[in-house]
Image (cartoon, grey):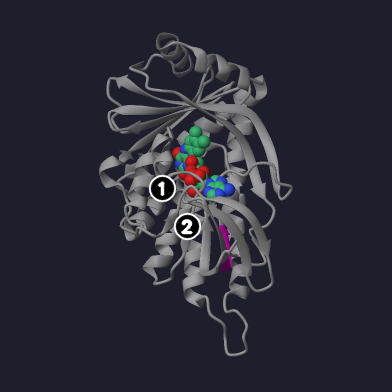
C-alpha cells in the first residue's frame, strides 16, 4: 500500500461554519490562502433553523467581504424590554443612535449561503473526518479521511472553528439548565421592525422580526422544553401567547428546533500553532444575541494579525506571527469576557421568580427607561459588543 503524500497548507481552518468562512474570506481578501474543512456536507447548513441578530459591526465586515445577505436581512428599529408579571419596561430606539437600525436579523442558512457563495470551488474539503492532530514546534500534522482517501496535511497554523465544543478539559462549562426552543410565527398586527425581549421566570423570551415573521427564541427549563416541543401548533401558540401577553397574536408556527444552553469558555485561545475562534472559543446564551457577533470579531482580528505579519519567517528564521498570536489572545480577552459576563448576568438576574429580585429588576428597567445614559450603555453593548466596537 502506498503511503499518503504529505501536503503543505499555510493555514488550515477546521469548521466551515459562518466564523470559519469569514476568516477564510478575510484572509483571501488580503491575499493569504487558507483551506477550510468540515465534517458535514455543505447543504447541511441549509437545515439549520436558527435566526441570528447581527450587529452593525458584523454587517460592516460582511459587506467588506461581499457576503452581506442584504435581501434576507430584516432591520431591527426598536427593542422593547420587559418582564412578565412585574413592572418596568424600556424601549431602545435606533433614532437615539443615529443609525439605520439597531441590528439585523438573518436566518443562519442565508448567512451561510452568502458566505459560501464567495468561496472558490476548492476552498473547502467537505464531509471530512479528522483522524489525528499532532501538534509540533514548527507545524501541526493533521491526518484526515476525505472522499474515502487518507490524506496528511502539514500546516503552519491550525485554526479551530468547529462551533460549540463537546467535553473538553480546556473548556469551563456552566450549564443554565435551559433549552432554547426556536420557531417562526406570523404576528398580527405586523411587527413593525420591533424586537421584543421579555423576561419570564422560566427564562427569557425573544422575538426577532424576520421578513413578515417573528423568529421566536423561547428559553425554558428542560422538562418544559420537552413539553413545548411535543405540543401541537395550537397548544404551542397558546403557550407562547401566555408568556408574551396579548399585545399581539401569533399564528402559523413553523417547524421547531431545540438547543441546550450553557456558557462554555475555553481557557486558552492560542496553544503552539493552534488557535480557537468563534463558538469553540466561547459559547454564550443567545439572550443578548452576541455569539456570532463575537465570533466574527475573533475572525476579523485574527485575519488582521496574520495579514499584517505574513506566514513567512524573518531573516533569523523566527516566524513573524509568533508574538502576534500571543497579542491576539490578549486582545480578545476584554471583548469575550465582557460579552460573556454581560450575557451571563442578564440570564441569571432575570431567570427567576424571587420577589426582591423581581422588584430590583423592575426598578432596573424603570431606571433604564428614565435614564438615557444607562440605557445607552446597555444599547451600545447590544449594538457593538462589549468594547462598543464599531
Ligand atoms: C438558539 C440560538 C440563537 C442564537 N442567536 C444568535 C443571535 O441572535 N446573534 C448571534 O450573534 N449569535 C446567536 N447565536 C449563536 C450563533 O449561532 C453562533 O455563535 C454561531 O453559529 C457560531 O458560528 P461558528 O462558525 O463558530 O460555529 P457553527 O455555526 O457551529 O459552525 C461550526 C462548523 O464546524 C463544523 N465542525 C464541527 N466539528 C467539526 C470537526 N470535528 N471537523 C470538521 N468540521 C467540524 C460543523 O459542521 C459546522 O459547519 C445563537 C445560537 C443559538 C443556539
Q: Is residue 222 above or below residue 108?
A: above
* Residue depicted at x 41% and y 45%: 42
Secondary structure of the residue carrying numbered label 1: loop
Q: Which percent across, then down, holds residue 324?
A: 59, 72
The numbered disc on residue 186 is none
Q: Which percent across, then down, holds residue 273?
A: 63, 67
- From mark 2 to mark 1, how far is it between C-alphas? 25 Å
Magenta segment, prevailing SS (helix, strand or loop): strand
- Residue receiving disc 1: 55
Q: Is residue 18 visible?
A: yes
Secondary structure of the residue carrying numbered label 2: strand
* Residue depicted at x 65% and y 74%: 138
Q: Is residue 336 above or below residue 174?
A: below
The magenta segment: 154-159
- Residue 193 is left or right of residue 49, and the answer is left
Give residue 33's quadrant in the image. Answer: bottom left
Q: Nearer the viewer, mark 2 or mark 1?
A: 2
The N terminus sits in image quarter: bottom right
Residue positioned most to the right: 169
The C terminus sits in image quarter: bottom left
Q: Are marks 2 and 1 in contact (CB under 8 Å)?
A: no
Residue at mark 1: C-beta within 8 A of ligand 1: yes
Q: Which percent across, then down, holds residue 241?
A: 43, 14
The numbered disc on residue 36 is 2
* Residue depicted at x 43% and y 71%: 32
2 or 1: tag closer to the N-terminus: 2
- Residue 130 is left or right of residue 369, and the answer is right
* Residue depicted at x 38% and y 50%: 56
Q: Which percent across, then down, holds residue 16?
A: 47, 51
* Label 1 neighbour load within 10 Å: few <14, some 14-19, many 20+: many
Nearer-the-camera pick, 95 or 166 = 166
Amino acid at each position: 500500500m502506498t503511503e499518503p503524500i504529505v501536503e503543505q497548507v499555510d493555514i488550515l481552518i477546521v469548521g466551515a461554519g459562518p466564523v470559519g468562512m469569514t476568516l477564510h474570506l478575510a484572509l483571501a481578501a488580503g491575499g493569504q490562502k487558507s483551506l477550510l474543512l468540515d465534517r458535514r456536507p455543505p447543504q447541511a447548513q441549509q437545515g439549520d433553523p436558527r435566526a441570528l441578530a447581527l450587529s452593525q459591526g458584523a454587517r460592516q465586515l460582511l459587506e467588506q467581504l461581499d457576503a452581506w445577505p442584504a435581501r434576507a436581512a430584516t432591520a431591527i428599529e426598536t427593542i422593547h424590554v420587559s418582564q412578565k408579571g412585574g413592572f418596568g419596561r424600556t424601549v431602545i430606539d435606533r433614532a437615539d443612535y443615529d443609525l439605520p437600525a439597531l441590528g439585523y436579523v438573518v436566518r443562519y442558512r442565508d448567512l451561510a449561503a452568502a458566505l459560501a457563495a464567495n468561496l472558490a470551488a476548492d476552498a473547502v474539503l467537505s464531509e471530512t473526518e479528522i483522524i489525528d492532530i499532532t501538534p509540533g514546534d514548527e507545524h501541526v500534522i493533521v491526518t484526515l479521511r476525505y472522499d474515502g482517501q487518507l490524506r496528511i496535511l502539514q500546516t503552519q497554523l491550525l485554526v479551530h472553528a468547529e462551533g460549540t465544543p463537546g467535553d473538553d478539559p480546556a473548556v469551563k462549562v456552566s450549564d443554565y439548565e435551559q433549552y432554547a426552543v426556536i420557531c417562526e410565527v406570523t404576528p398580527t398586527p405586523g411587527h413593525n421592525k420591533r424586537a421584543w425581549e421579555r423576561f419570564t421566570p422560566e427564562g427569557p423570551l425573544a422575538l426577532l422580526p424576520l421578513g413578515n415573521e417573528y423568529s421566536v427564541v423561547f428559553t425554558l427549563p428542560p422538562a418544559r422544553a420537552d413539553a413545548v416541543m411535543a405540543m401541537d401548533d395550537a397548544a404551542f401558540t397558546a403557550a407562547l401567547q401566555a408568556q408574551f401577553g396579548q399585545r399581539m397574536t401569533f399564528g402559523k408556527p413553523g417547524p421547531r428546533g431545540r438547543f441546550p444552553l450553557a456558557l462554555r469558555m475555553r481557557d486558552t485561545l492560542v496553544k503552539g500553532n493552534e488557535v480557537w475562534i468563534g463558538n469553540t472559543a466561547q459559547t454564550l446564551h443567545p439572550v443578548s444575541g452576541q455569539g456570532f457577533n463575537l465570533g466574527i470579531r475573533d475572525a476579523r482580528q485574527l485575519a488582521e494579525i496574520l495579514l499584517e505579519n505574513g506566514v513567512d519567517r524573518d531573516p533569523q528564521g523566527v516566524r513573524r506571527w509568533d508574538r502576534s498570536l500571543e497579542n491576539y489572545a490578549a486582545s480578545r480577552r476584554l471583548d469575550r469576557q465582557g460579552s460573556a459576563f454581560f450575557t451571563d448576568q442578564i440570564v441569571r438576574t432575570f431567570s427567576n421568580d424571587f420577589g426582591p429580585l423581581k422588584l430590583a429588576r423592575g426598578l432596573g428597567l424603570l431606571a433604564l427607561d428614565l435614564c438615557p445614559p444607562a440605557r445607552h450603555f446597555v444599547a451600545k453593548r447590544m449594538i457593538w459588543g462589549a468594547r462598543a466596537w464599531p
